[in-house]
């Protein structure tokens, strides 16, 4: 069992990364407040899948390949920045629109839930720097000869940690008191979220240029 003790350090680093404010938090919060608790949790599943995907890439050494192919990394970052700005635009446009008055059952249809899942995953993987952060954690903590199934264990761990944190965010923000506050401040909250997402997208463009 001691041969897997390094996983605790990786878990702590992944939890710290999940808890740091970023686009994933904004999207989970916005879906939880504007739609429903279920939408927020499904979005959290999407962000968890994105974290697990990045962990798998890092574990398989794909990050080294990306570092050696600047063109692919450039396209990756460009697409991520464009998606964040596209998402920000949609949130900004919908800022002044009233919340849907349909029932939770109507809102939680298969199409809407699938959209929330995809949005959570897309936002998580829209920042390619995340995979390099995870890779740096691995290189600092991972033993030179990791035990069997390490890549699989770390991938599952990344998913569980990220999903658990954002599911907690979704459950907290989907409370009735939170929704009442959101209804009063919807336009301000959505525009603030849109500005932050735009800033993050522009930050990616800035890093590409400079």
Image (spheres, rainbow, N blue to C red):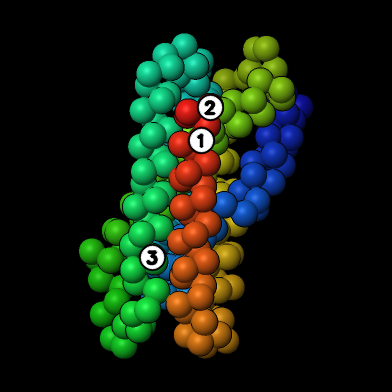
Q: Is residue 115 above or below residue 146?
A: below
Seen at 72% across and 24% down, the residue is 141
* Label 3, label 1: how far apart the Cα atoms are: 22 Å
Q: SS class of the residue under badge 1?
A: helix
- Confirm whether residue 163 shows in the render: no
Which residue occupies 46% across, 36% down? Answer: 205
The local crowd at label 3, few if under 14, some if 14 to 19, many if 20 or more residues have their Cα within 10 Å, is many
Q: Kindly check if marks 2 and 1 are in contact, taking CB atoms under 8 A apart as contact.
A: yes
According to the picture, the residue beneath numbered tag 3 turns out to be 91
- The part of the image, by quadrant, that contains residue 149 is top right
Tell me where residue 3 appears, x and y as whole percent.
72, 23
Tell me, for residue 210, which label it has, or none: 2
Element on which disc 2 rests: loop
In the image, residue 165 above or below residue 34: above
Q: Residue at x 43, y 33 (%)?
A: 77
Q: Sequence order check: which comes first, mark 2 or mark 3?
A: 3
Which of labels 2 and 3 is toward the front? Answer: 2
Please state, as top left, top right, bottom left or bottom right, where the N terminus lies in the image: top right
Counting from the top left corner in percent of width and height, residue 86 is at: 34, 52
Residue 36 at x, y = what percent?
41, 75
Picture layout, residue 166 above or below residue 103: above
Q: Which mark is residue 206?
A: 1
């Amino acid at each position: 069992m001691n041969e897997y003790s390094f996983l605790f350090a990786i878990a702590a680093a992944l939890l710290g990364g999940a808890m740091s404010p970023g686009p994933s938090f904004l999207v989970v919060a916005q879906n939880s407040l504007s739609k429903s608790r279920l939408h927020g949790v499904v979005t959290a599943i999407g962000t968890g899948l994105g974290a697990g995907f990045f962990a798998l890439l890092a574990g398989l050494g794909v990050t080294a390949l990306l570092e050696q192919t600047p063109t692919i990394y450039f396209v990756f970052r460009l697409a991520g920045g464009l998606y964040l700005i596209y998402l920000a635009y949609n949130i900004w446009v919908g800022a002044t629109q009233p919340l849907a008055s349909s029932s939770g059952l109507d809102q939680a249809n298969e199409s809407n839930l699938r959209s929330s899942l995809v949005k959570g995953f897309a936002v998580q993987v829209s920042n390619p720097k995340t995979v390099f952060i995870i890779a740096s954690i691995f290189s600092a903590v991972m033993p030179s000869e990791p035990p069997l199934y390490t890549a699989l264990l770390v991938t599952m761990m990344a998913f569980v940690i990220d999903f658990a944190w954002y599911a907690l965010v979704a459950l907290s923000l989907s409370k009735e008191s939170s929704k009442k506050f959101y209804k009063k401040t919807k336009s301000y909250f959505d525009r603030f979220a849109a500005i932050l997402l735009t800033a993050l997208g522009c930050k990616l463009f800035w890093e590409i240029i400079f």
